[in-house]
Image (cartoon, rainbow, N blue to C red):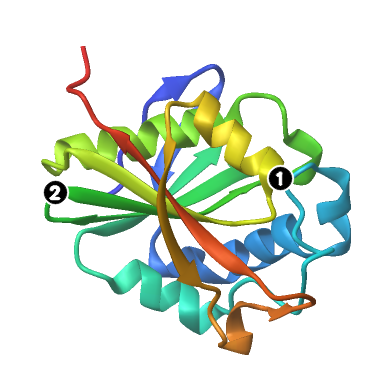
C-alpha cells in the first residue's frame, strides 16, 4: 500500500518491487558511488563495492512488516529512502540514503520521523539501528535526534554483496524510545 502526504515539499511513499532497479542505483550512488563524495554520509573511504544489489533490495522489501520509505519531490524525483521493519516491540531502521547533493536539507530528518511513525503505527516501543563504529559524525547526528548508544556491538557483514571493508569494521547499536506521537 502506498500512502502519500506532503511535508516541506516532500512526498512520502512506500516502495514496491517495481522500484527496485532505481532504488538500487540510488542507494549505491548515495553510499559508495562517485557522487557519494558530494555528501557527508559517504562510506566510499571505508568500503569498496556496492551497498546493495537488486536481489538484496527485493529481499528487504519482501520481509514481513517491512517497508522502504521514499521521500520524493512533487516531480517524482527520489530524494531519499529508508528501510523499516517492525518486529514485536522494536522497529529496525536501516539503509538511510539521501541524495548526496541534497544532504543538509531535512530529507534525512523527514525520513527518520516517518520511520519512527511507522514503528508507532505497528505498536513498536523502541526504534533500533546499527551504525559503523568509525562513523562518529553519523553517530553524533543520530544522538542529536534522540538516539543513544546501547553498548551492544555486531560484526560487520562479511557478505561482499554489502561491500568489502578496507579496514576492520564493527557496528554499534543505537536505540530510541518511541513515545506516542501527539
The kind of secondary structure element at disc 1 is loop
Q: Are marks 1 and 2 in contact (CB under 8 Å)?
A: no
The image shows residue 88 at horizontal and vertical percentages of 12, 55
* Residue under the image location 54 percent in, 24 percent down: 144
User: Does residue 55 lie above or below 57 as drawn?
Assistant: below
On the image, numbered disc 1 is attached to which residue?
A: 99
* Residue under the image location 51 percent in, 69 percent down: 20
- Is any atom of residue 49 visible in this view? yes
Tell which residue pokes out farthest to the front in this image.
151
On the image, numbered disc 2 is attached to which residue?
A: 89
- The dot on residue 43 is none
User: Does residue 21 lie above or below 142 as drawn?
Assistant: below
Q: Which of the pair 157/169 is nearer the observer?
A: 169
The image shows residue 79 at horizontal and vertical percentages of 63, 41
Task: Classify 10 Å Cα crowding around label 1: few (below 14), some (14-19), many (20 and above).
Answer: many
Q: Is residue 68 left or right of residue 105?
A: left
Q: How many marks?
A: 2
Quadrant the C terminus occupies: top left
Q: First in sequence: mark 1 or mark 2?
A: 2
Q: Is residue 48 left or right of residue 126?
A: right
Amino acid at each position: 500500500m502506498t500512502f502519500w502526504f506532503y511535508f516541506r515539499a516532500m512526498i512520502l511513499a512506500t516502495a514496491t518491487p517495481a522500484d527496485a532497479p532505481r532504488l538500487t542505483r540510488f542507494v549505491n550512488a548515495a553510499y559508495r558511488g562517485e557522487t557519494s563524495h558530494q555528501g557527508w554520509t559517504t562510506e566510499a573511504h571505508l568500503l569498496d563495492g556496492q551497498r546493495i544489489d537488486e536481489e538484496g533490495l527485493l529481499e528487504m522489501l519482501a520481509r514481513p512488516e517491512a517497508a522502504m520509505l521514499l521521500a520524493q519531490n512533487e516531480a517524482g524525483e527520489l530524494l531519499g529512502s529508508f528501510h523499516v521493519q517492525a518486529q514485536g516491540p522494536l522497529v529496525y531502521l536501516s539503509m538511510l540514503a539521501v541524495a548526496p547533493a541534497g544532504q543538509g536539507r531535512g530529507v534525512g530528518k523527514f525520513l527518520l520521523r516517518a520511520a519512527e511513525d511507522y514503528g508507532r503505527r505497528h505498536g513498536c516501543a523502541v526504534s533500533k539501528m546499527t551504525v559503523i563504529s568509525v562513523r562518529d559524525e553519523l553517530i553524533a547526528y543520530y544522538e542529536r535526534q534522540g538516539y543513544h548508544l546501547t553498548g551492544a556491538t555486531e560484526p560487520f557483514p562479511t557478505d561482499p554483496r554489502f561491500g568489502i571493508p578496507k579496514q576492520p569494521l564493527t557496528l554499534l547499536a543505537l536505540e530510541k524510545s518511541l513515545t506516542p506521537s501527539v
